[in-house]
């Protein structure tokens, strides 16, 4: 019944200790989400809160530890705070009447580097007003400023929403389609969903659910079949479907069944476009041709799960890469939100990212590009290794 975290706007709240970050979050949510105290460093870890923030919609607040926290284990907490920036769609910097200094400007530089819109909230004006010099210093960086007090300003939530609406990313306001923009309304689409070891009992996996919902919202006629029934499904139609979308693991079999004049792609490639940069992933896959014996390849997964005998990230893709290249590659896996040390890798392969937001994937692409390391994703790599990448991306 709830919007998934990966589909929510992630709002990161940053600032020094004891400037009122947690008080702000509690005020916005109208709940005691974070502990509030006059003691510095009360928030010791990232606190997450999902809610419907009308009229903006589903959001996920990330209340971080103070970036100048000097308490025990402070360095580890600050590391976690800085990593949260990679998951942040919109940044909120909270300061008090003293204004900003190097702590906040370091954050601003990081936001600008990752193209993250942000606002600055000057809190605690019930104690003391901010002077013109401090305010003008903030204005050198942004005009999106809210001067307020979480204790006395009765309209703080309204003012916060108003300012937030000014800086929201376009792709959040105009929510991108997963597949509905690639085909005409009322089109017939076949979704091919193999039921294998990775299919959860009694359910289908998240990207398939989201794609189906997107097709329904786009008023398309959707036929959902297993790969073993695909040929029968095609023969039952009076006209060829407008599109066939398959699970990447059945790509080879499905591509042999679906006529060449029928567009074909995969769920993972749909999500490469939705959550990442499709062109960057396509270019990244071409680096497979340059891999040599002993080269290291990193496979990134957004979520952790128990690996099965023929796990896609730990078994199937490594086998495809070794078969395609004929090289003795060193393939390593990493799961979770943290981004590991990528130095020394010759290629990074990202999962479909159904469990994380677009900003985190784009941040990872940016970090890979800066390090000069090609990056691609599951569906793109699989179709490249099978020799059907051109067909799989033709519809885009």
Image: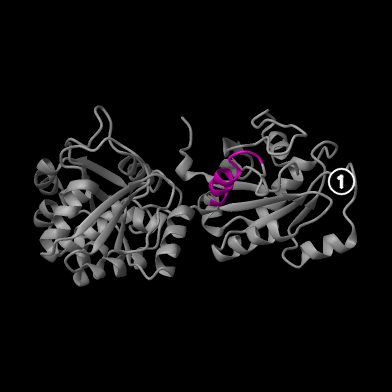
> Which residue ends up furthest to the front in the rendered image?
72
- Reply above or below: 1 against 377: above
Residue on which disc 1 sits: 125
Colour treatment of the image: one colour
For residue 345, what is the image quadrant?
bottom left
Element carrying mark 1: loop
Residue lying at 72% horizontally and 63% vertically, measured from the top left? 142
Question: Residue 278, position in %: x, y?
Answer: 35, 63
User: Crowdedness of circle 1 by 10 Å Cα count: few (<14), some, many (20+)?
Assistant: some
Question: Residue 76, position in %: x, y?
Answer: 54, 44
Magenta span: chief secondary structure: helix
State whether residue 266 appears in this view: no
- Reply above or below: 292 against 311: below
Residue lying at 24% horizontally and 70% vertically, measured from the top left? 286
Q: Which residues are magenta?
A: 71-82
State whether residue 99 appears in this view: yes
Q: How many marks?
A: 1
Residue lying at 52% horizontally and 50% vertically, measured from the top left? 83
Front residue of 96/25: it is 96
For residue 127, what is the image quadrant?
top right
- Reply above or below: 395 against 209: below
Q: Quadrant of the C terminus?
A: bottom left
Question: Residue 37, position in %: x, y?
Answer: 74, 32
Question: Residue 342, position in %: x, y?
Answer: 37, 60
Front residue of 85/246: it is 85
Front residue of 286/110: it is 110
Residue 46 falls within the magenta-colored stretch: no
For residue 31, what is the image quadrant?
top right
């Amino acid at each position: 019944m709830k919007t998934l975290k990966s589909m929510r706007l992630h709002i990161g709240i940053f600032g020094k200790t004891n400037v009122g970050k947690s008080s702000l979050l509690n005020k916005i949510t109208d709940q005691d989400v974070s502990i509030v105290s006059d003691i510095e460093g009360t928030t010791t870890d990232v606190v997450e809160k999902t809610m419907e923030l009308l009229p903006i919609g589903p959001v996920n607040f990330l209340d971080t530890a103070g970036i100048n926290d000097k308490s025990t284990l402070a360095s580890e907490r600050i590391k976690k705070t800085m990593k949260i920036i990679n998951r942040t769609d919109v940044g909120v910097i909270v300061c008090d009447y003293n204004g900003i200094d190097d702590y906040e400007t370091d954050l601003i530089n990081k936001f600008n580097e990752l193209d993250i819109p942000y606002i600055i909230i000057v809190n605690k004006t019930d104690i003391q007003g901010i002077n013109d010099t401090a305010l003008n210093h903030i204005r050198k960086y942004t005009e999106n400023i809210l001067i307020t007090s979480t204790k006395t300003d009765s309209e703080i939530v309204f003012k916060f929403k108003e300012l937030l609406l000014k800086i929201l990313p376009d792709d959040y306001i105009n929510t991108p389609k997963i597949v509905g923009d690639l085909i005409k309304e009322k089109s017939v689409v076949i979704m091919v969903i193999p039921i294998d070891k990775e299919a959860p009992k009694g359910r289908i996996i998240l990207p398939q659910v989201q794609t189906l919902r997107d097709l329904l919202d786009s008023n398309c006629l959707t036929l959902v079949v297993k790969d073993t029934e695909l040929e029968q499904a095609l023969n039952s139609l009076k006209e060829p479907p407008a599109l066939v979308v398959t699970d990447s693991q059945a790509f080879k079999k499905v591509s042999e069944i679906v006529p060449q004049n029928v567009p074909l792609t995969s769920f993972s490639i749909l999500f490469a476009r939705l959550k990442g940069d499709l062109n960057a992933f396509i270019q990244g896959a071409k680096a497979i041709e340059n891999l040599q014996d002993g080269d290291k390849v990193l496979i990134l997964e957004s979520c952790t799960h128990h690996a099965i005998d023929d796990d896609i990230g730990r078994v199937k893709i490594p086998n495809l890469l070794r078969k395609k290249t004929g090289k003795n590659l060193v393939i390593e896996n990493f799961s979770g939100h943290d981004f590991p040390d990528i130095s020394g890798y010759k290629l990074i392969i990202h999962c479909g990212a159904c469990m994380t937001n677009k900003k985190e994937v784009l941040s990872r692409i940016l970090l890979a590009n800066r390090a000069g390391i090609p990056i691609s994703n599951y569906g793109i790599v699989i179709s490249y290794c099978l020799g059907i990448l051109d067909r799989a991306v033709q519809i885009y």
